[in-house]
DNA sequence: TTGAAAGCGCTAACAG
DNA sequence: CTGTTAGCGCTTTCAA
């Protein structure tokens, strides 16, 4: 005997109610071919014994488990939490439950290896399908259903939802350039993410297409946290020929800009993500942040896609492009003109 | 055949490497009694086949799974997220992985019934133990290990960690009363939570013990969200004889107070949780918020307790009281004195 | 050092 | 309508 305590099983229920395990199983699964009598008796016993089915055993036998998995390397970042929120919302509206799997820390895992492991772990075992966030591999050794959010690889073999990062960045730049800005700083983030690469590309291409030189000293790369962005923003703001606008490529980085500006005594309105300022008080808000705020929405959509796939809905797209919105909250009233 | 696709199993590995399943299993579990030769061969095959063990099947046979569960009714609230963060931190430092289980929405579940179901679902099946947040029942039909955070019932049969809610509230009130405040508003929260009840009790007792009448019109009950707290705070601030201080019993509620004050044109420093103000600009900050900020810490401790229990550490306490700190950030410079 | 075989708890044929 | 039975993929005796 390995386990000191062995939980109540379907066998106990069967014995106690004087029927066979299959009958109990039928009751459990709401099959119609059970007499009302038996059904009631079994249900009573289940109740009084406090029986609950063993997830593991059940998963081994039946295909449908009404459970979807969400795999994230780390649960501590705002990004992860936003995704969870979105997925959660979709789950709440469905008949599915959600299982979030994490190893606690990105650094603890060697991404590629581990994410493959977790996908098949969950997918082949106890869930009907999984959503995986920012996977780095392009293929998974699983026959189960899978949807990914913001994959890091270029042409993954699985369905995914992504933001229109490049287009969003271009739109943001078009706006700033339209305001007359010519020196625009850029705060980037985790370069291992496709989204990050694409945003930066949008920035570069925009400048290039406007026939402008790219000043590499205006480009700084953090890690999408405000903590890192703050000193970088300061650095940008204190060079001899500072930018008149800063394109913070995600929300957290924008926060960093605010903090930096605050410490330097430059006033900026509260809710900027993209700031264009000329050392006075002007600012432009471009909701490139949408790329981030829409993360929650991406989670929502991914969950819906997955549920659709599980339900064998034939209309589920293989690739979903979330268009980033351009939302201007504060227009730049004063712009340094070249 | 039910499933069209059947994943790679231990059997496939055995066949491909020309050994028996038991040998493969031994390799998988790092048993020492396997020849180096065989071990290497099997490992190679596992790698090339991309095999990963079936969680469900494994869980059925072996006791230890290096997996802990976190059960929360809803994942969308700051409270839940803070707990997760804390648990996650502890997990990251350990050899365990984390599985978060949620039904997406509190309202979707009939709490008591469902939480029992989920606990035994996870606990008897695939995890080594579970942490459950704010459970309403006092007993669980599980033989597995369990630690709870902020249980709603009075004398649960399982180990738990809780904040010293009552004492914290008393301390907060002592501070405010010491500043000379005599009309202190109170914004409460979800009354189904023990923590909520205890904070309010601390408030009432403090007033009573100071020989003061309790003005019920100064007590408003929200749901621990700023959205709800805001109009309540406004209501408090706009009565004819407004309070000179407000004791917001959680962080979110404090936020609501700020928002309300802002709209009413009353300036309050940024980081107040407990505000005492006299319609000028004074304020007292009492980190009663700790009760909330420490939530993350509670998650951390709960996880450590659980891990200790799993590892059969005999020193794990059955009840852990998290002392709430009294942190004063801004002292009240001007107080309306009676 | 290895293999054969017995289950873990459950579901799904297949017979009655 | 109900019971018998055969596994699901895995770990763990028990023999060899």
Image (spheres, coloured by chain):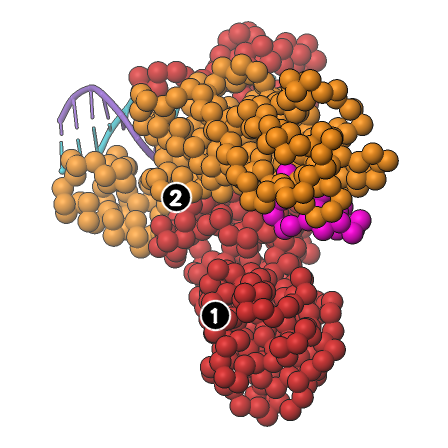
Chain colours: A red, B orange, C cyan, D purple
- The crowding category of the residue bearing disc 1, from other C-alpha atoms within 10 Å (few below 14, some 14 to 19, many at least 20), is many
State whether discs 2 and 1 lie on one chain. Answer: no
Considering only vertical position in the picture, is A222 above or below B319? below
| Residue B124 visible somewhere in the drawing | no
Seen at 19% across and 49% down, the residue is B40
A311 with respect to B232 (left or right) = left
Foreground: A317 or B125? B125
Seen at 25% across and 48% down, the residue is B43
B24 with respect to B252 (left or right) = left
What's the magenta region?
Answer: B255-274
Foreground: B200 or A46? B200
Q: Which mark is in front, 2 or 1?
A: 1
Image location of residue A84, percent across then percent down: 58, 47
Q: Chain of mark 1?
A: A
Considering only vertical position in the picture, is B323 above or below B51? above
State the separation of the CA atoms marked 2 and 1: 29 Å
Image location of residue A5, percent across then percent down: 39, 16
Foreground: B293 or A23? B293
Q: Which residue is mark 1?
A: A232
Quadrant of the rendered image containing residue B257: top right
Q: Which mark is residue B92?
A: 2
For this orientation, the residue located farthest to the front is B338
Seen at 63% across and 14% down, the residue is A43
């Amino acid at each position: 005997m390995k386990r000191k305590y062995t939980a109540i099983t379907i066998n106990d229920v069967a014995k106690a109610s004087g029927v066979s395990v299959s009958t109990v199983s039928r009751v459990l699964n709401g099959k119609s071919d059970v007499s009302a009598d038996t059904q009631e008796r079994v249900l009573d016993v289940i109740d009084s014994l406090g029986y609950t089915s063993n997830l593991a055993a059940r998963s081994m036998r039946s295909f449908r488990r009404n459970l979807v998995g969400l795999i994230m390397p780390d649960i501590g970042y705002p990004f992860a939490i936003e995704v969870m929120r979105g997925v959660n919302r979709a789950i709440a509206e469905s008949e599915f439950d959600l299982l979030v799997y994490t190893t606690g820390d990105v650094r603890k895992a060697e991404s590629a290896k581990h994410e493959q492991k977790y996908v098949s772990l969950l997918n082949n075992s106890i869930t009907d399908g999984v959503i995986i966030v920012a996977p780095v591999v392009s293929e998974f050794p699983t026959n189960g259903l899978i949807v990914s959010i913001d994959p890091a690889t270029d042409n993954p073999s699985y369905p995914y939802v992504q933001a229109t990062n490049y287009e969003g960045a271009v739109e943001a730049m078009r706006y700033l350039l339209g305001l007359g800005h010519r020196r625009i700083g850029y705060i980037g983030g985790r370069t291992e993410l496709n989204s990050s690469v694409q945003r930066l590309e949008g920035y570069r291409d925009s400048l290039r297409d406007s026939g402008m030189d790219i000043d590499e000293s205006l480009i700084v790369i953090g890690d999408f946290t405000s903590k890192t962005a703050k000193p970088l923003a300061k650095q940008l703001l204190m060079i001899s020929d500072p930018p008149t606008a800063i394109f913070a490529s995600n929300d957290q980085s924008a926060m960093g800009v605010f903090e930096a500006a605050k410490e330097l005594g430059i006033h900026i309105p509260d809710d900027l993500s993209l700031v264009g300022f000329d050392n006075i008080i002007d600012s432009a808000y471009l909701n490139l942040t949408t790329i981030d705020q829409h993360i929650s929405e991406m989670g929502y959509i991914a969950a819906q896609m997955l549920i659709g796939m599980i339900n064998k809905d034939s209309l589920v797209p293989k690739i979903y492009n979330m268009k980033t919105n351009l939302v201007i909250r504060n227009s730049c009233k004063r712009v340094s003109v070249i």
